[in-house]
């Protein structure tokens, strides 16, 4: 037996000890566990990006008789994509203008500037916004003030003598009703 | 007595309280830093503690659901013992906290305390400032009233202007297709978990930085910050003439902090909380949404800036302003700290503060908003109609009925959106008045479709009488009419 058999040469690569291995294994398992927790968390929070986005439905606003000819009236509907605990916030108001017997225009309540509720003044035929002073004509077009466009206008249809609008989203500049 | 002392020694032995004291509130600071100018940071901390205590208490009763939030606020205000008082403390605590963190920041900026080696302290402080503003906005939303509801609608609309990502950003914030239950829950989670968690974490780093780097010494004109030598100099100053923060250095902090506390208590007890202004029911549109004071300047800016700038400001200017705020220590690298040697800094603070205060004052007045009730609630003053013709009287009636007063005041009474009409006849001729009424222009809607010809005649006849007794009405230079006014003026 040669003597150097009992004295091993220093290894070229540092040996992987059990401690090193466990540490790296621990990191790997923790990484896996973090992904298993983290990915669903991100998905949970970001689900709002998918859930209900762009979803629209036809919503009845009321019988045609409830909108007198030549007038603009406040109406409201229950948002179809909602939870019972949304309470009154799911009641969405809108302005209904009946120009002629079968000729309607339905405007979102939200000012096209920054979303405040516009009010209708029949005497002067204007919608006015209480926040930054946007004003619109009776046909929803911009009259003055900071709004970059006219009022948001719903798609409409008449079914069984009822006026229906296509809605479901809060209108804003990137997503006009 | 002896047992208490023994208990103290036992606790000190296990917890090393003496060492903790020595490294925290007992650490040595330059004597010059124990100044009345250096009390605003600790006073902000006092506010934060009030907010944490009262906030936890309010959360015991408040219900973050659109169906119940308003009712639970009213319960807090009128039924829950001390509920109104705690709401008052929380409301005034937030007002004081926003004000004090701003003052703290201005003081640090003016004293050049963000310079080497305290750049990171400043940046973490900026993050703390943003967190405080975030708390203020989400907190305003917890008071789920009409202002809160429409405030969220406005933020959603601002996000909706982001090109490309607007739709995603609004849905992420709303948590659904509309501002509703999930929106309020999201704001609640932000207000009680996410932002306070971040705020406390950032505060730990901020205080750690203050302890590691030391409180900046009172600036002296001409004394330069030299990165090579600064830290040795500072150590020397603290070594030779330093005092302990507590008890020697902190007396002013204690006095000022207590005064702030007393001021909050007094405001809460005498003025009380902000009462919610009606339930957040979107169908109640007879509302005039206004933000709490810290957002008045932003509110005003969005009313006053030219419309074509708005998206530019939202997408570029506001983020750039925040980046600039964080980057202050790397932009301002001069060695001087004293404000008298840094006129640029003084001018910057003056301009920014004056702009913010002016905008906030305009926000309180909001002259750009039509006065929605002026047409029915602010009559034409008798002196404008006394002795006028029947035609002018009819015109005055039309001026009211057609909501002209919502935007136009008569001698100060009425809306401020358009020019005051007292004296309008000295500025516009009859023809110009007719054209302005029919066609609008210069921010005025056209009334052509909503005024019959006889109404226009009457209205312009009345407007033509609106000039001072001894000042003739405007007339066209081209006109050779023998009647200089063109207006019927029976006297």
Image (cartoon, grey):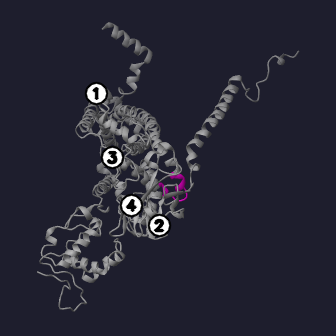
- Residue nearest the observer in this picture, B331 or A9: B331
Q: Say yes or no: labels 3 and 1 on the same chain.
A: yes
Q: Say yes or no: labels 2 and 1 on the same chain.
A: no
Could you tell me if residue B86 is visible in this image?
yes
**Mark carried by residue B248:** 1
Residue, disc 3: B106
Tell me the SS state at disc 3.
helix
Q: Quadrant of the C terminus of chain B?
A: bottom left
Give the Cα separation between the discs numbered 3 and 1: 26 Å
Could you tell me if residue B433 is visible in this image?
no
Residue, disc 4: A118
In the image, taking residue B460 as reference, residue B281 lies left or right, namely: right
For the residues carrying marks 3 and 2, which lies nearer the camera in this image?
A: 2
Q: Position of residue B440 (x, y in %)?
A: 34, 75
Give the Cα separation between the discs numbered 2 and 4: 15 Å
User: Residue sitting at 58 percent across and 48 percent down?
Assistant: A51
**Mark 4, chain letter?**
A
Q: Which residues are magenta?
A: B159-170
**Label located before the other in sequence (2 or 4):** 2
Give the Cα separation between the discs numbered 2 and 1: 74 Å
Tell me the SS state at disc 4.
loop
**Mark carried by residue A105:** 2
Give the Cα separation between the discs numbered 3 and 2: 52 Å
Classify mark 2: residues with Cα within 10 Å, few (<14), some (14-19) or many (20+). Answer: some
Q: Position of residue B240 (x, y in %)?
A: 33, 29
- Residue nearest the observer in this picture, A79 or B40: A79
- Residue A35 within the segment the image draws in magenta: no
Give the Cα separation between the discs numbered 4 and 3: 39 Å
**Mark 3, chain letter?**
B
User: Residue sitting at 29 percent across and 31 percent down?
Assistant: B82
Classify mark 1: residues with Cα within 10 Å, few (<14), some (14-19) or many (20+). Answer: some
């Amino acid at each position: 037996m040669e003597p150097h058999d009992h004295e091993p040469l220093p290894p070229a690569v540092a040996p992987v000890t059990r401690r090193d291995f466990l540490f790296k294994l621990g990191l790997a398992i923790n990484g896996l566990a973090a992904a298993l927790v983290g990915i669903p968390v991100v998905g949970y929070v970001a689900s709002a990006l998918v859930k209900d986005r762009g979803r629209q439905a036809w919503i009845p606003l009321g019988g045609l008789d409830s909108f007198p000819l030549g007038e603009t009236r406040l109406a409201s509907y229950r948002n179809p994509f909602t939870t019972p605990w949304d309470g009154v916030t799911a009641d969405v108001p809108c302005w209904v203008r009946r120009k002629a017997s079968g000729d309607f225009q339905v405007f979102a309540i939200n000012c096209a500037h920054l979303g405040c509720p516009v009010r209708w003044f029949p005497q002067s035929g204007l919608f006015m916004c209480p926040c930054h002073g946007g004003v619109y004509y009776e046909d929803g077009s911009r009259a003055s003030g900071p709004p970059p466009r006219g009022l948001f206008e719903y798609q409409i249809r008449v079914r069984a003598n009822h006026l229906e609008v296509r809605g479901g989203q809060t209108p804003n500049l990137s997503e006009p009703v | 007595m002896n047992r208490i002392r023994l208990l103290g020694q036992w606790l000190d032995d296990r917890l090393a309280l003496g060492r903790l004291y020595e490294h925290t509130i007992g650490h040595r600071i330059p004597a010059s830093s124990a100044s009345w100018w250096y009390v605003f940071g600790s006073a902000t901390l006092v506010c934060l503690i009030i907010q944490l205590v009262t906030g936890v208490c309010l959360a015991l009763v408040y219900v973050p659901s659109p169906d119940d939030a308003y009712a639970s606020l009213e319960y807090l205000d009128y039924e829950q013992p001390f509920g109104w008082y705690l709401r008052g403390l929380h409301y005034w605590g937030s007002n004081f906290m926003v004000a004090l963190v701003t003052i703290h920041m201005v003081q640090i900026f003016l004293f050049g305390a963000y310079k080497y080696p305290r750049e990171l302290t400043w940046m973490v402080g900026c993050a703390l400032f943003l967190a405080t503003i975030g708390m203020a906005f989400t907190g305003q939303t917890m008071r789920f009233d009409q202002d809160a509801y429409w405030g969220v609608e406005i933020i959603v609309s601002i996000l909706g202007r982001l090109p490309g990502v607007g739709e995603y950003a609004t849905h992420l914030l709303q948590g659904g297709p509309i501002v509703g239950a999930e929106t309020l829950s999201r704001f609640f989670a932000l207000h009680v978990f996410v932002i306070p968690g971040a705020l406390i974490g950032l505060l730990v780093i901020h205080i750690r930085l203050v302890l590691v780097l030391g409180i900046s010494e009172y600036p002296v004109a001409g004394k330069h910050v030299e990165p090579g030598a600064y830290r040795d100099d500072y150590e020397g100053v603290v070594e030779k003439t330093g005092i302990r923060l507590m008890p020697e250095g902190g007396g002013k902090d204690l006095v000022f902090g207590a005064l702030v506390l007393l001021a909050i208590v007094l405001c809460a007890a005498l003025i009380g909380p902000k009462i919610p202004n009606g339930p957040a029911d979107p169908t109640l549109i007879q509302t005039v949404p206004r933000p709490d004071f810290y957002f008045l300047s932003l509110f005003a800016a969005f009313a006053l800036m030219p419309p074509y700038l708005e998206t530019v400001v939202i997408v570029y200017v506001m983020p750039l302003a925040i980046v600039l705020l964080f980057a202050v220590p790397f932009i301002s690298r001069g060695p001087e700290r004293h404000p008298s040697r840094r006129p640029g800094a003084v001018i910057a603070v003056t301009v920014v503060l004056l702009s913010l205060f002016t905008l906030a004052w305009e926000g309180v007045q909001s002259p750009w908003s039509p006065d929605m009730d002026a047409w029915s609630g602010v009559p034409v003053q008798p002196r404008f109609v006394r002795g006028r013709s029947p035609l002018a009287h009819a015109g005055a009636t039309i001026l009211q009925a057609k909501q002209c007063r919502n935007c136009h005041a008569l001698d100060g009474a009425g809306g401020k959106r358009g020019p005051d009409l007292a004296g309008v006849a000295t500025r516009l001729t009859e023809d110009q008045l007719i054209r302005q009424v029919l066609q609008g222009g210069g921010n005025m809607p056209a009334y052509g479709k909503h005024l019959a010809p006889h109404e226009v005649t009457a209205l312009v006849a009345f407007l033509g009488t609106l000039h001072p007794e001894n000042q003739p009405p405007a007339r066209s230079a081209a006109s050779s009419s023998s009647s200089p006014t063109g207006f019927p003026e029976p006297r």
